[in-house]
């Protein structure tokens, strides 16, 4: 059997985090009732005129600079013509001839090493609507809320040779867009979607094979599975004497296979022409300099700083910098506590556990960022113990309560007063004669049992170290 290699190029669509659409003032908020975020402009009514949202240009330039692109100084918009039920205008405003960004690259790391992935272009365009298929009635309904939501389409060069490289690239793109504040990249809401163009060829051959396109795959794991399946399908087809057809295929993640949707169009099939209603956009050097100075510290830079300046383990730094929500929480907590490693421990051990139990991502957390710092300070100052701290954090996570007020209202402050602890411990000793006898006889594990009984009797509010010391002193006095 011939040794084949896969060749992949990606088209990634990122919905931009603007409050209004690209050419009208309709809301871009996700989750509205169907067909409520629509007006005459984005629904394509005759006689209406689009007006470009300036924020879209700013976000596009930010993304281009962050991804090492050349910025096109003179931009124009074009009409991409096609007929589909979720496209009420029968055309999409996009950029074919003068995309706003060109010739960029992203450096990725996989187990195979470091590699640079070329970015052919980034262009601004409007999104289409959404078709909703009802499996019960067999009917298809159209929701036009998404029509006109601003997109950046990031088109890579065909530089990928494995699913691992694709996932590393998509992760890097997602992190960059989130750090910029350009897009939330929530794949579950469709704000980051990837079209995978894949072909195979005998290893060493310069000419590309015939490609297929798999559209709008909804998760990184699904993308990896789809790539592996489509590679195997094309190889089996060629080895069996067949030919790969250029077409668009749909990935069924439940059944784990691709199936043909339609023949794959080329640019000429869309009959592009310059949009007559939109003026060219000119980008000055002064504007570029202004945007460049506003770029944030990105994940790789933060990771290096966390490791080299704050002393975090690389694993902790990797996890925290993988989420802008965790970065904000960590940096605010360190600001309040001046305790980077302790802050990291709470986030890695407790916050992420609560996220997992609630089946949410860190980006969906709703509690006040100051709360974790307040809890850590109360623990470090001996006002509450770690066990109570975890209970308070759970309440903060679920209901966003004020941690200090919650501790006060529920009488959770740590008991450190010897005069309050000692009578309780003597009662525990009196009620557990067997364990006391065993400990005095040299069975050390019985001491742990007595400590546990003592903490339970004190409602978990006592200082564990104080309890251990006082209990030991009492028992040693009984020898």
Image (spheres, helix red, strand yellow):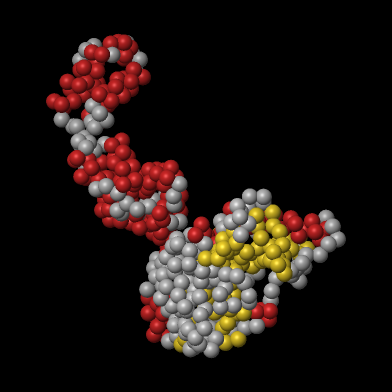
Identify which residue is drawn at 67% across, 51% down: 256
Left of 260 or right of it: where is 145? left
Residue 74 in sight = no
Query: Of all residues shown, which one is farthest toward the right?
Result: 241
Identify which residue is drawn at 70% across, 70% down: 264
Identify which residue is drawn at 44% across, 83% down: 51
Residue 381 in sight = yes
Residue 232 position within the rendered picture, expressed as x and y whole percent measured from the top left: 74, 55
Q: Is residue 426 above or below residue 72?
A: above
Q: Nearer the viewer, residue 283 or 136?
A: 136
Q: Nearer the viewer, residue 441 or 155?
A: 155
The quadrant of the picture occupied by the N terminus is bottom right
The quadrant of the picture occupied by the C terminus is top left
Residue 272 position within the rendered picture, expressed as x and y whole percent measured from the top left: 62, 83
Q: Is residue 403 above or below residue 114?
A: above
Identify which residue is drawn at 33% across, 20% down: 449
Residue 88 position within the rendered picture, expressed as x and y whole percent measured from the top left: 56, 75
- Circle count: 0
């Amino acid at each position: 059997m011939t040794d084949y290699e896969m060749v992949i190029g990606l088209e990634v669509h990122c919905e931009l985090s603007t409050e209004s659409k690209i050419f009208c003032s309709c809301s871009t908020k996700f989750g509205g009732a169907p067909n409520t975020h629509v007006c005459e402009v984005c629904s394509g009514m005759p006689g209406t005129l689009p007006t470009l949202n300036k924020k879209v240009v700013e976000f596009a330039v930010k993304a281009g600079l962050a991804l090492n692109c050349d910025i096109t100084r003179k931009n124009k918009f074009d009409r991409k013509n096609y007929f589909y039920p979720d496209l009420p205008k029968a055309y999409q405003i996009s950029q074919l001839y003068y995309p706003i960004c060109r010739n960029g690259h992203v450096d990725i790391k996989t187990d195979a090493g470091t590699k640079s992935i070329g970015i052919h272009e980034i262009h601004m365009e409007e999104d289409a609507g959404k078709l909703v298929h009802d499996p019960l009635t067999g009917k298809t309904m159209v929701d036009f809320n998404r029509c006109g939501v601003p997109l950046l389409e990031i088109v890579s060069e065909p530089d990928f040779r494995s699913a691992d490289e694709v996932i590393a690239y998509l992760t890097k793109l997602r992190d960059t867009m989130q750090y910029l504040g350009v897009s939330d990249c929530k794949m579950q809401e469709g704000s980051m979607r990837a079209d995978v163009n894949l072909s195979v060829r005998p290893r060493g051959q310069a000419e590309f094979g015939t490609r297929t396109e798999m559209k709008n795959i909804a998760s990184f794991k699904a993308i990896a599975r789809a790539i592996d399946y489509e590679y195997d399908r094309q190889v089996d087809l060629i080895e069996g004497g067949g030919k790969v057809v250029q077409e668009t295929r749909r990935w069924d993640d439940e059944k784990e296979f691709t199936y043909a949707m339609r023949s794959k169009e080329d640019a000429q099939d869309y009959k592009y022409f310059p949009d007559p209603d939109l003026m060219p956009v000119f980008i000055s050097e002064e504007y570029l300099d202004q945007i460049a100075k506003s770029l944030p510290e990105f994940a790789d830079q933060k990771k290096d700083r966390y490791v080299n300046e704050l002393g975090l383990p690389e694993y902790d730094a990797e996890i925290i910098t993988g989420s802008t929500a965790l970065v904000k929480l960590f940096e605010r907590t360190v600001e309040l506590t001046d305790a980077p490693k302790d802050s990291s421990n709470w986030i890695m051990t407790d916050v992420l556990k609560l996220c997992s139990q609630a089946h949410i991502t860190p980006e969906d957390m709703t509690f006040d960022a100051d709360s974790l710092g307040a809890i850590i300070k109360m623990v470090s100052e001996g006002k509450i113990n770690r066990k109570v701290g975890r209970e308070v954090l759970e309440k903060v996570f679920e209901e966003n309560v004020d941690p200090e007020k919650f501790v006060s209202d529920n009488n959770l402050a740590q008991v450190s007063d010897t005069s309050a602890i000692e009578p309780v411990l003597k009662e525990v000793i009196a009620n557990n004669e067997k364990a006391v006898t065993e400990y005095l006889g040299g069975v050390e594990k019985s001491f742990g049992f007595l400590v546990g009984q003592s903490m339970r009797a004190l409602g978990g509010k006592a200082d564990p170290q104080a309890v251990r010391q006082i209990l030991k002193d009492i028992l040693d006095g009984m020898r």
